[in-house]
Amino acid sequence: QVQLQESGPGLVKPSETLSLTCNISGASISSHYWSWIRQPPGEGLEWIGYIYNSGNTNYNPSLKSRVTISLDTSKNQFSLKLISVTAADTAVYYCARRAGSTPIFDYWGQGTLVTVSS
Amino acid sequence: EIVMTQSPATLSVSPGERATLSCRASQSVSSNLAWYQQKPGQAPRLLIYGASTRATGIPARFSGSGSGTEFTLTISSLQSEDFAIYYCQQYNNWPPLTFGGGTKVEIK
């Protein structure tokens, strides 16, 4: 059974860096593509980016200048870094697995709320 | 960027009734359209992809239709567990992958 679990600080100060990790169980990180998606409180979903099992990435152009997604195959996990955060980055952050060759999401983590506040 | 617009924002339906949700794309996405269900405090769940193919384990009362710019998700007979927010997502022209703003299906 595939399970994804996000972890990281729940509170980040403005202008600092948001860092999250997604731990994967029940699947090999090397066999699939992985993504981060976020959802501001009470709002809709925003795709942040993908990382491929090759390590190549694809980001939302609106966030591209601030985002880095990386793999750690030895730990079967991948990570998100978002620099220079503001209150607008406050959201529930989800990690998710891409469903094979189709850029949709078949497995999701439970999500973690990150609040940007001083 | 392709903008996805869902309507209505809120749909009030009685249990056992039919619900019809709409999703419109700002330009053609062919059949590259997925639907997700999200319950409070939970992650979204994939329901439909390819505009009309149900994901694994999704009941037959959920059906999707449409192509191009107009899409519909139909729930034939609403069960109590179906009251949730539903999102559409296009994957025809990306990055970025984009989602609609959601339709909340509530109990009438």
Image (cartoon, helix red, strand yellow):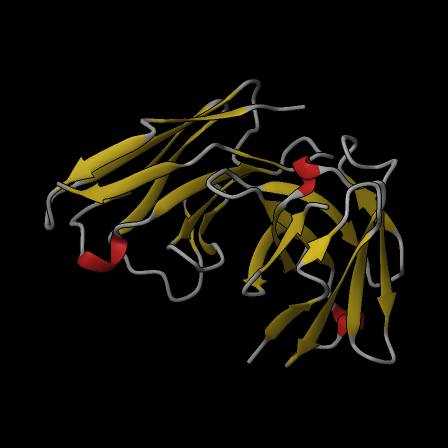
In this rendering, is residue A117 above or below B2?
below
Measured along the vertical axis of the image, is residue B54 above or below residue A4? above
| Residue at 24% from the left image edge and 53% from the top image edge | B61
Q: How many labels does the image show?
A: 0
Q: Is residue A91 placed above or below B26 in the rendered structure?
A: below
Residue A56 screen position, x and y as percent:
89, 53
Question: B74 left or right of B18?
Answer: right
Q: Position of residue A13 (x, y in %)?
A: 77, 48
Q: Nearer the viewer, residue A80 or A106?
A: A80
Query: Which quadrant, please, contains the N terminus of chain A?
Result: bottom right
Where is residue A29, by image quadrant? bottom right
Q: A76 or B56: which is nearer to us? A: A76
Horizontal and vertical percent position of residue A24: 69, 75
Residue drawn where x is 68% and y is 30% of the image? B93
Residue A22 location, x and y as percent?
71, 67
Residue furthest front as drawn? A118
Residue at 81% from the left image edge and 71% from the top image edge: A30
Q: In this view, does A76 lie to the left or right of B58?
A: right
Q: Quadrant of residue B85?
A: top left
Q: State the residue in front, A4 or A55.
A: A4
Q: In this view, does A11 lie to the left or right of A111?
A: right
Q: Which residue is drawn at 18% across and 56% down?
A: B79
